[in-house]
């Protein structure tokens, strides 16, 4: 975290949290970091990580990437297989890739 907030001293966070009881998520430092804040009673659980290519995807596109087949993704999302194909095309454009092998490489590098 010191790479992104070199002048910050612990134990406080280097950014402001809203004191809401809902889950908050967003990006910081010119979209180089992502954060997720989950309320836990009187406390908050804060996750902070460097962005990766998969952070560019919306919920449906992320679901398509996680599934092994068009049929499985379509069933899970409650849409036609052709809609899954459209989501996958957008994923390829956003990630600037052209094959499922490249997508698998990205997913594998992020999950390991």
Image (spheres, rainbow, N blue to C red):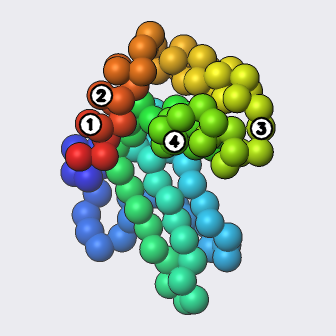
User: Disc 4 designates what residue?
Assistant: 67
SS of the residue under disc 2:
helix
Label 4 packing within 10 angstroms: few (<14), some (14-19), many (20+): few
- Residues at marks 3 and 2 touching, judged by CB atoms closer than 8 Å: no
- Relative height, residue 2 to residue 54 (above, below): below
User: Disc 3 designates what residue?
Assistant: 79
- Give me the C-alpha separation between circle 2 and circle 4: 15 Å
- Give me the C-alpha separation between circle 1 and circle 3: 28 Å
- Front position among marks 1 and 4: 4
- Residues at marks 1 and 2 touching, judged by CB atoms closer than 8 Å: yes
In percent of width and height, residue 35 lies at: 46, 54
Ranked by sequence position, the earlier of labels 2 and 4 is 4
In percent of width and height, residue 1 lies at: 26, 52
For the point 44% across and 67% down, the residue is 46
User: Disc 1 designates what residue?
Assistant: 109
For the point 77% across and 32% down, the residue is 80
> Which residue extends farthest front?
71
SS of the residue under disc 3:
loop
- Relative height, residue 64 to residue 95 (above, below): below
- Front position among marks 3 and 2: 3
Ranked by sequence position, the earlier of labels 4 and 3 is 4
- Give me the C-alpha separation between circle 1 and circle 4: 17 Å
- Relative height, residue 90 to residue 76 (above, below): above
- Give me the C-alpha separation between circle 4 and circle 3: 14 Å
- Give me the C-alpha separation between circle 3 and circle 2: 26 Å
User: Disc 2 designates what residue?
Assistant: 105
Front residue of 53/27: it is: 53
Front residue of 7/56: it is: 56
Label 3 packing within 10 angstroms: few (<14), some (14-19), many (20+): few
Label 2 packing within 10 angstroms: few (<14), some (14-19), many (20+): few
- Give me the C-alpha separation between circle 1 and circle 2: 6 Å
Is residue 99 visible to us here? Answer: yes
């Amino acid at each position: 975290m010191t790479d992104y907030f070199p002048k910050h001293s612990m134990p406080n966070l280097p950014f402001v949290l809203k004191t809401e009881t809902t889950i908050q998520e967003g990006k910081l430092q010119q979209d180089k970091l992502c954060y997720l804040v989950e309320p836990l009673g009187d406390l908050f659980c804060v996750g902070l990580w460097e962005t990766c290519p998969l952070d560019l995807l919306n919920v449906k596109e992320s679901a398509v990437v996680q599934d092994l087949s068009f049929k499985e993704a379509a069933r899970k999302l409650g849409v036609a297989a052709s809609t899954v194909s459209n989501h996958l095309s957008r994923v390829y454009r956003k990630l600037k890739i052209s094959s499922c092998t490249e997508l698998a490489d990205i997913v594998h590098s992020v999950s390991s």
